[in-house]
Image (tube, rainbow, N blue to C red):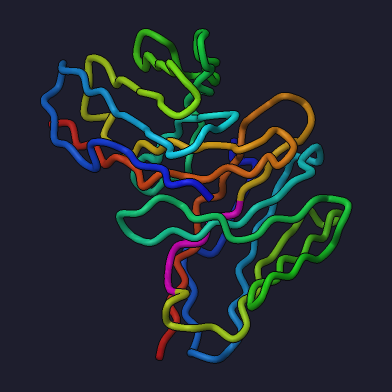
Amino acid sequence: DQQVKQNSPSLSVQEGRISILNCDYTNSMFDYFLWYKKYPAEGPTFLISISSIKDKNEDGRFTVFLNKSAKHLSLHIVPSQPGDSAVYFCAASVRGTGANNLFFGTGTRLTVIP
Amino acid sequence: SAVISQKPSRDICQRGTSLTIQCQVDSQVTMMFWYRQQPGQSLTLIATANQGSEATYESGFVIDKFPISRPNLTFSTLTVSNMSPEDSSIYLCSVEYSRSQETQYFGPGTRLLVL
C-alpha cells in the first residue's frame, strides 16, 4: 500500500516559469516531509524539508507547502532553470518514534524547457 | 555534508551468485541505511545497519537474503545473496548525521542487473 503518492509521473515547464510538484499521503502520523532530487546514475539529493508544525518552508528558489488537513504537500520552484530537470521524490516519516523508515513516492520527472 | 561513496557503481551478475556492495562515508555518522529501488518503483527501505550488532530489517526483507555488516561508524556492506532476476534494482545506502536531524543523505547507488 503506497502511503506517499505522486500522481504526476512527469511535468514540463518553460524556463523562468514556476514548477509545481505535488505529493499526497495517507498516513496521518507522518510529521516530517522531505523532497529529494535525482539525476540519472546518481543517488537522491536532499533539497528541502518541512515539519508538520509549519505550513511553509522556503530555501532560495525552492518552497515547500504543507496542507495537513488535505494530507498534501507541494514543491514550488521559481524560477525554473534547465538544470532543475530531474526526477523529484517526496518522502515522509514519523519522527521521534525510533523508526527510521522514509516512505517515498514514485517520483515526478521534471523537464525544464530552455 | 559528508561524501558518501558506493562500490561497485554497477554490476551484471549471474543468477545464484552473490554480490557485496560497500558504502563508505568520509566522516562518522549516527545511522546508516540500505534502500532498494526496483525499476519504475519508489525507494524501499531494506534495513538499518547497526554498528556492532545485527541489522534491523523491514517487513519483507530477511538477513539470509540481505546480510548487512557495519563494523564502524563510517562503513557498511550489503550482500545480495543467491540472486535472481527479480533482484535487479538500484541499491542505495543513506546516512543520518544525528538523530535530532532525521534527514537522510544518499550515496550514488549501485545498479545491479541479474541475468
Left or right relative to A90: residue A74 = right
Which of the 4 image quadrants contains residue B6? Answer: top left
Tally of numbered discs:
0
Residue at screen point 48% across, 83% down: A81
Asked if residue B58 is positioned above or below residue B24 in the image, the reply reads: above
In x, y percent, where is residue B47? 50, 23
Relative height, residue B93 to residue B16 (above, below): below
Residue in the picture at 64% in, 29% down: A100
Is residue A92 a member of the stretch shown in magenta? no
Towards the viewer: B69 or A31: B69
Going 70% across and 50% down the picture, which residue do you hit?
A33
Please report the bounds of the magenta region as a residue range.
A85-90
Q: Would residue A86 be counted in the magenta stretch?
A: yes
The majority secondary structure of the magenta stretch comes to strand
Extreme-front residue of the structure: B27
Residue in the foreground of this view, choosing between B86 and B89: B89
Question: Dividing the picture into quarters, in which one does residue B9 lie?
Answer: top left
Q: Residue at x 59, y 35 (%)?
A: A1
Residue B75: x and y in percent read 41, 27
Q: Nearer the viewer, residue B72 or A48?
A: B72
Looking at the image, residue A55 lies above or below residue B76: below
> Horizontal and vertical percent for residue B19?
22, 23
Task: Tell me if residue A81 comes above or below residue A23 in the rendering.
Answer: below
* Residue B99 pos. (x, y %): 70, 33
Is B83 placed left or right of B91 in the picture?
left
The C terminus of chain A sits in image quarter: bottom left
